[in-house]
Amino acid sequence: MTHPSIKMLLTVLVVLMLSSTADAAEINLSVAASLREVINELSAGYARKNPGVMFVKNYGASGSLAKQIENGAPADIFISANLEWMEYLKNRKLVDDKSIGAFAYNELVFAGRPDLTVHSLSDLVKLDRIAIGSPKSVPAGEYAMEAIRKAGIDKQLEKKLVMARDVRECLMYAERGEVDGSFVYKTDALQAGKKATILFIIPQTLYRRVTYPMALTVSGSTKSEAVAFFRFLQSTEARGVVTKHGFPVQ
């Protein structure tokens, strides 16, 4: 039988735990999948220094995230892998346009089995299956299609392309050997295992520079905790973490 004083103490502890959870400030992040490790590290470090803050993170293709925000999904900060999807939300007045700025940059590469003898885009016509993020929602796929068209090989690759939900899925297909290779960001390819490696870098002259814009959503701009974290993402400390993961910041 539980002693009354112990029972009372347990009740107080439960009440304190529930009240501290209720008091915790929740920040909802919608972030391009290729930034997962960066944002995980930044949010974890920030939460350690600000114990009253909790993060709810949603990673995915930029287009899918933008559509989710448009449909009412909770989001305080949006970081896209291209300018178009940020513009999409700006035009719908769903982000605070004064807060929009560049978070990081990246490069597009072709990754695949180390034994593949492909050194340029023109060599890809020899392959059977190539993974690419769906250009309608995945910026990496959009950049890749831009490069393919400018290289004049879009018709030859038309039936060889395997669509993926995001850049991480592209890399997974290559690592499993389900495709010969895939178009991914350099930062993702550097994290790949031995089954997939960077075979060549896509010339920057063939596509627009990969830019990650970030912004507070309209609702996020009214939350002091979200605004504070957004400022932290622009700090020297945060930029150091971004560059550590291989992303240029200018």
Image: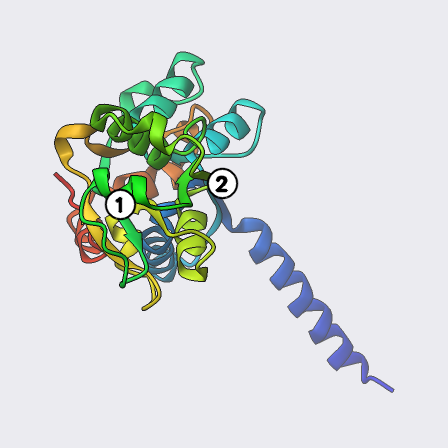
Picture residue at 39% right of the left edge, 57% below the top:
47
Q: Quadrant of the C terminus?
A: top left
Label 1: how many residues lie within 10 Å, few (<14), some (14-19) or many (20+)? some
Looking at the image, tell me whether mark 2 or mark 1 is earlier in sequence order. 2
> Where does the image place residue 208, in percent across and percent down from the top left?
20, 27
Q: Quadrant of residue 190?
A: bottom left
Picture residue at 44% right of the left edge, 37% below the top:
61
- Extreme residue toward the top, this view: 91
Q: Secondary structure at mark 2?
A: loop
Q: Secondary structure at mark 1?
A: helix
Picture residue at 68% right of the left edge, 66% below the top:
14
Label 2: how many residues lie within 10 Å, few (<14), some (14-19) or many (20+)? some
Residue 249 numbered tag: none
Label 2 is placed on what type of residue? Arg
Query: In the depicted view, which residue is nearer to us: 193 or 119?
Result: 119
In the depicted structure, whether residue 230 falls above or below residue 147: below
Q: Kindly check if marks 2 and 1 are in contact, taking CB atoms under 8 A apart as contact.
A: no
Residues under labels 2 and 1: Cα distance?
30 Å
Label 1 is placed on what type of residue? Phe
Residue 165 numbered tag: 2
Query: In the depicted view, which residue is nearer to us: 83 or 95?
Result: 83
- Does residue 213 appear in the picture of this structure? no
- Is residue 157 left or right of 122 when viewed as pictured? right
- Extreme residue toward the front, this view: 126
In the depicted structure, whether residue 133 falls above or below residue 242: above
**Which residue is under mark 1?**
232
